[in-house]
């Protein structure tokens, strides 16, 4: 049933992929666009898991790259739902790169994306409510509400 209430943990996703030479520049650094695509994919899975519907990316609120990812690293994407509105939802994604030879893990990027759920005709439709279970979930919700309010204020000035 698409509109049942769900918890953050029910939609949490962890995806992993080895960075290959085709993902990188000649120096062995993975392209930012490759990381962006992986982020969008992970976040989209979270949104679809929550709504059990088709979803579209409406915006990327923020994307920060902290460290490079290199060929051979294991790219780990941890994504979860932060906030839901009537038809939209914010997903947070944390990207880590693991050197599989040493076990060192670095936080390489973070992003916040907004998705809209679509009905069978391709129109925005209501999304299930979200229950924040843990203190971490509640912190992420509060921060997501702040980002939403900032976006609303920015959009009001247009």
Image (cartoon, rainbow, N blue to C red):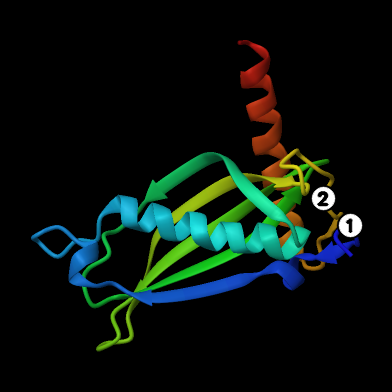
The answer to whether residue 13 is above or below residue 102 is: above
In this orientation, which residue lies closer to the viewer: 68 or 124?
Answer: 124
Residue that sits furthest to the front in the current view: 121
Q: Which residue in the structure is indicated by mark 2?
A: 127
Residue that sits furthest to the bottom in the current view: 101
Q: Position of residue 58 (x, y in %)?
A: 60, 39
Which quadrant is the C terminus positioned in?
Answer: top right
Q: Is residue 140 left or right of residue 73?
A: right
Determine crowd level at label 1: few under 14, some 14-19, many 20+ residues with C-alpha closer than 10 A. Answer: few
Q: Quadrant of residue 52?
A: bottom right
In this orientation, which residue lies closer to the viewer: 126 or 134?
Answer: 126
User: Circle 2 sits in a helix, a strand or a loop, which is it?
Assistant: loop
Q: Residue at x 78, y 42 (%)?
A: 87
Q: Is residue 51 left or right of residue 107?
A: right
Residue that sits furthest to the left in the current view: 26
Q: Residue at x 51, y 60 (%)?
A: 41
User: Circle 1 sits in a helix, a strand or a loop, which is it?
Assistant: loop
Q: Position of residue 11 (x, y in %)?
A: 71, 68
Q: Are marks 2 and 1 in contact (CB under 8 Å)?
A: yes
Compare marks 2 and 1 and give the one earlier in the sequence.
1
Q: Tell me the tag on residue 15.
A: none
In this orientation, which residue lies closer to the viewer: 103 or 49?
Answer: 49
Q: Position of residue 22 (x, y in %)?
A: 20, 66
Q: Position of residue 91 (x, y in %)?
A: 63, 53
The answer to whether residue 124 is above or below residue 95 is: above
Q: Is residue 18 left or right of residue 47?
A: left
In this orientation, which residue lies closer to the viewer: 3 or 93?
Answer: 3
Which quadrant is the N terminus positioned in?
Answer: bottom right
Q: Which residue in the structure is indicated by mark 1?
A: 3
């Amino acid at each position: 049933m698409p509109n049942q209430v769900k918890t953050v943990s029910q939609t949490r996703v962890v995806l992993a992929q080895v960075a290959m030479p085709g993902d990188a520049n000649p120096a062995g650094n993975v392209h930012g666009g490759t990381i962006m695509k992986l982020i969008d994919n992970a976040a989209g899975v979270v949104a679809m898991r929550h709504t059990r519907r088709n979803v579209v990316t409406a915006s990327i609120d923020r994307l920060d790259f902290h460290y490079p990812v290199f060929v051979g690293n294991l790219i780990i994407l941890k994504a979860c739902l932060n906030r839901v509105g009537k038809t939209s939802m914010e997903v947070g994604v944390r990207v880590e790169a693991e050197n599989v030879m040493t076990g060192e893990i670095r936080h390489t990027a973070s992003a916040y994306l907004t998705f809209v759920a679509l009905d069978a005709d391709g129109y925005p439709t209501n999304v299930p409510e979200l229950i924040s279970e843990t203190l971490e979930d509640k912190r992420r919700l509060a921060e997501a509400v702040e980002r939403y309010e900032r976006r609303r204020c920015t959009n009001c000035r247009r």
